[in-house]
Every structure is written in structure tokens, then in C-alpha cells.
Amino acid sequence: MDTTRPFPHAMLREIFEQPQAIAETLAAYAKSESLREEVFAPARQALAGRDSILIAASGSSRHAGLSGEILFEDLAGIAVDVEYASEYIYRSTQTLHNPCFVVISQSGETADTSEALREAIARGCSTIAITNKPESSMARLAGCSLPTFAGVEKAVPATKSFTTQLAVLSLLALYTARVRGCMTRAVVESHLEQLFRVPSALEGVLPRWEQEMARIATVLKEAETFLFLGRGIHYPIAREGALKLKESAYIQAEGYPTGELKHGPNALVNRRNPLVVLGTCDPSAPDSVLRYEKTVNLVRDMHKQGAQILSIVTEGDTRITELSDHVITVPATAEYISPLFEVVPLQLLAYFMAIGRGIDVDNPRNLVKAVVQE
């Protein structure tokens, strides 16, 4: 990042700080070719003998948790449930047997997540805390602390804290897969190699995305409602994109699994209610190709219906591109790593929609950075 560049808002500066934040987080937990065993030793102890994982979080952190659910289940073969932290204490103690309990929180002080952590400890769960503050109460209370390295984040909308959460969850899922015998060393090394490419690739495309999204936001400034769509690992990113738009620009938005659009929400679709479609593809992964083909079919149908479509696609894509009004391309990478790229243009969309509406994007109304009391 150009350290001499003046940024008009903390949110935009923090979006541009993500390559460095992700790089520092990756370096804390892995070398380019291997995971740091000594760093993950407490996590290994927390996971030992546990047959499931229960993730509790709120807001953007919960969306990171939903990504973690897919990573852990698909890569490590361990069952995962994701709870709203505010709901966990009201759930029966019989919901999951013997889970490892993982809390995710930017501040490490969020009241409902802290309460959920204390309840999990009382229920005899082993615990892991993923926070941006290693000295926070959650980090101290949990049996294992896995901090992110996002640095200070002044803007209320989460940007670099979210992507570093994704990075930690990706690394923890790879570690879990390795110790459970679900991945060979070579496969883990391949994933790590692609993860370590993310910061430089992200830094290279951020200036282009900034220009493109500023222009797109101008075109979309009269939009009334947005529907964000994603399949598989991309669905939590659709949810996060919708949340960013709601909290930053005060625009109603919802995130849906792509296949659910035709089960009611498509009644809302018109030129003033755009679709934001996550349509990336990893051609080396059959499941990713299948998801992509189904997304192409849906985008084609929505194009015929007259929808206004903003698509996030992999560089070189032509099929979804030709059916879309607006397109942002992201670098090609593995299926499970692509969310680290996809979410950043959605952050920029929220930012430019907000400033176009005259909103103090760093301090949206009715919101605070850390919820520390009910």
C-alpha cells in the first residue's frame, strides 16, 4: 500500500490495508510451505477427543464462522454448527455432544459472545477464541487463543478484521485436516502456497477495483434493495456483502444461497432491485464447476427477466460476464481461498454507496465498534 496516500475515510484506508494484514496473519501461523506446529499446539489440545465444532459469533464474525463451517467440514471432515452468540445460552445442552467451542469476535469483548463462551466452559466444552485483541477477555478466558493480526480498525464496518478472521479459519481448518489425517502434507502445502499469494495479488488489483466500484456505485445510486447471491463457500460472503451495504449505506439488502432466489425472492427483482452475484470458478474443483454452471443458468434466467446484475467473476470469465450489466473480475485461485478476494469489492461497493448518500461511513448511525453491554 502507498503509505503516502491520503485516504478520506478510515474505512477506505483499512480496505487498502488488507494485503498487509492478511500477510502478517499468515506469517504468524505458517511458513510458505508448512504450518507452525508450536502455534497450533493449544488448538490441537482443544480439538483432541472432540467429535464436532460449535462456532458462536455475531455480525460479520458470524459470517466468517459460516465460512469456517464449510472449511472444517469439507477439508477436515468434522461436523460444525454455527450459532448466533446471542442465542447460544438459550439452546438445550443436548444440541451437540462434546463439541470444541469456537468464538469469533473482533474486539474479544462483545457481551453476548462473552456470555456464550462462559456458558460453553460451564458445559465442559474445550474452547478456542479468534479475536483481534490477544489481551481481550475472551482470549484470556478461552483455552486457546488464535489472534488475528489486523491491527487497529477505526471504522465501524469490519473490513480487514473480517478477512484476517477468514485467514485464521482457513489455517485452522488446514491444521485440523492434517492432524485428522484428511490431507497429505503435499495437499496442505499446495493450499498454503495459494494462500500466501493472496496479499500481493490483492494489492495489485485493489486500485482497479476502487475505480471500477466507484463508477458502478454511481450507476446504482438509485437502487432500493439489493439481493446478494452465492453458493457453497461463497454464500457467507453474500451475507457479508449484504450486511456491509446495510450498515454502511442504510440500504436494505439480503444474502441468499443462489439456488434459493427462485423460491420467492425473485419476485423482488427489477432494475431498481439489483442482484449481486458471486460467480467465480475454480476449474480444478468439480464441485466449483458444478456450482458455476448452475449460477450461469440462473444469471441467464434473471437476465431474461430484466434484472440489473452486478457479478463478481474469475479473471477470463466470459459466460456470466456477457449476461451482466456490471462485472468485477478477481484473481484465479482455489475454491476455498476465493472468498478472500470476493469480499473486498463488496466492501468497496458498500463504501462508495455510503459516501454517495452523504453518510459518515466510519461511524454509521446506531452502531458502535464493540458491543459491550446489552
Image (cartoon, rainbow, N blue to C red):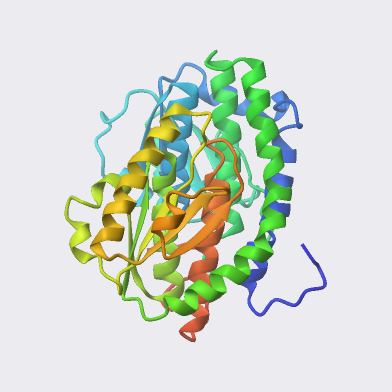
Position of residue 51 in the picture relative to residue 140 (left or right):
left
**Closer to the camera in the image, 247 or 124:** 247
Of all residues shown, which one is farthest toward the bottom?
A: 358
Residue 137 seen in this snapshot: no
Query: Residue 95, image x and y in percent?
Result: 27, 31
Residue 73 seen in this snapshot: yes
Location of residue 125 (image quadrant) = top left
**Closer to the camera in the image, 58 or 339:** 339
Query: Residue 209, image x and y in percent?
Result: 61, 64
Location of residue 213 (image quadrant) = bottom right
Query: Residue 177, image x and y in percent?
Result: 54, 21
Quarter of the image with the C terminus in it: bottom left
Q: Residue at x 73, y 39 (%)?
A: 28
| 153 vs 77: above or below | below
Position of residue 167 in the picture relative to residue 266 (left or right):
right
**Closer to the camera in the image, 32 or 303:** 303
Quarter of the image with the N terminus in it: bottom right
**Closer to the camera in the image, 1 or 317:** 317
Q: Residue at x 66, y 61 (%)?
A: 206
| 107 vs 166: above or below | below
Query: Residue 280, image x and y in percent?
Result: 48, 45
Position of residue 46 in the picture relative to residue 98 (left or right):
right
Q: Residue at x 63, y 44 (%)?
A: 147
Q: Residue at x 17, y 50 (%)?
A: 263
Q: What count of labels does the image hold?
A: 0
